[in-house]
Amino acid sequence: MEAQLSYIGRIQTPYRSLDDCPRNIEPGGPLCRLAIDPPFAAGLEGLAPGQQILILYWFEAVNRGNLRQASRRTGEPAGVFALRTPHRPNPIGAAVLRIEELDGSGILVRGLDCLDGTPLLDIKPAMAAETGRSTWQ
Amino acid sequence: MEAQLSYIGRIQTPYRSLDDCPRNIEPGGPLCRLAIDPPFAAGLEGLAPGQQILILYWFEAVNRGNLRQASRRTGEPAGVFALRTPHRPNPIGAAVLRIEELDGSGILVRGLDCLDGTPLLDIKPAMAAETGRSTWQ
């Protein structure tokens, strides 16, 4: 049972190799850009600088079959669903970020942890449970 | 450019039609169960009751091509990426939830908003930026 994804754009980051990538999202990290493909740009209407968004992206070239892996925090083996590793059955990354700036079909954010060129899947306004704030941003 | 998803299980909820579904996640809502397919159950090791998780799931039978829709809050048209509507190019739902209980290959949670039988894509430990807490749970 499977479903098909469409890439809505690509993420521009400073990282050209996995060794360069930070191990987690860094709220004050370097500027990155969500470059939305022109057919999807109309979907950005209503987003504004300062807003918190939840983005979903696709980790390419990972191992999708390894259900038990060593935790980077403890070194102990754990199930993949108890870890944030990109090597997972559906290698979808998730990050809650603040919109720094909008530029036409791009969104500037800070501190993503993925390779330059990573496919982007979705952008949603973050909800209170995702940001710890009591109202929508 | 596309990628393929594998369903790791199904979500059991009390809702048999879209009219029955709540419009948002309800932290104190009815019990729901994440039923993990046996080939993926080993991936649950290390999850514990009380832990906050981020789950990703797949909205079936939606319209993926409508980039501008009316906001349910304001009635005004907005871009799909400024809305939480399930009708989106990649119809992936995201929810931050507390694990109420673990039962073998199932996880009990509260207050999901989706139809009974909704395909489950991923479970991740929630991070501080997603829960508003200052440490991992």
Image (cartoon, coloured by chain):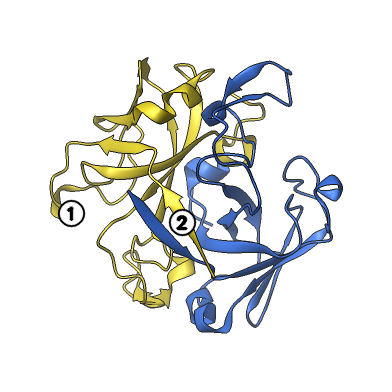
Chain colours: A blue, B yellow
Depth order, front residue of A6/B83: A6
Q: Amino acid at mark 2?
A: Gln
Depth order, front residue of B137/A39: A39
Please identify the quarter of the rendering in which residue A32 is found.
bottom right
Give the secondary structure at mark 1.
helix
Q: Is residue B18 visible?
A: yes
Q: Amino acid at mark 1?
A: Leu
Residue B55 placement (x, y as % from top left):
45, 39
Please identify the quarter of the rendering in which residue B113 is found.
top left
Instruction: Tell me: B84 left or right of A57.
Output: left
Query: Residue at coordinates 49% horizontally, 54% vertically from top-left?
Result: A136
The residue singled out by tag 1 in the image is: B18
Query: Residue at coordinates 41% horizontally, 54% vertically from top-left?
Result: B92
Give the secondary structure at mark 2.
strand
Give how far apart the Cα atoms at labels 2 and 1 are: 26 Å
What's the chain of the residue with tag 2? B
What's the chain of the residue with tag 1? B
Instruction: Tell me: B85 left or right of A61.
Output: left
Q: Nearer the viewer, mark 2 or mark 1?
A: 2
Q: Is residue A134 visible?
A: no
CA neighbours of label 2 inside 10 A, class few (<14), some (14 to 19), many (20+): few
Please identify the quarter of the rendering in which residue B89 is found.
bottom left
The residue singled out by tag 2 in the image is: B4
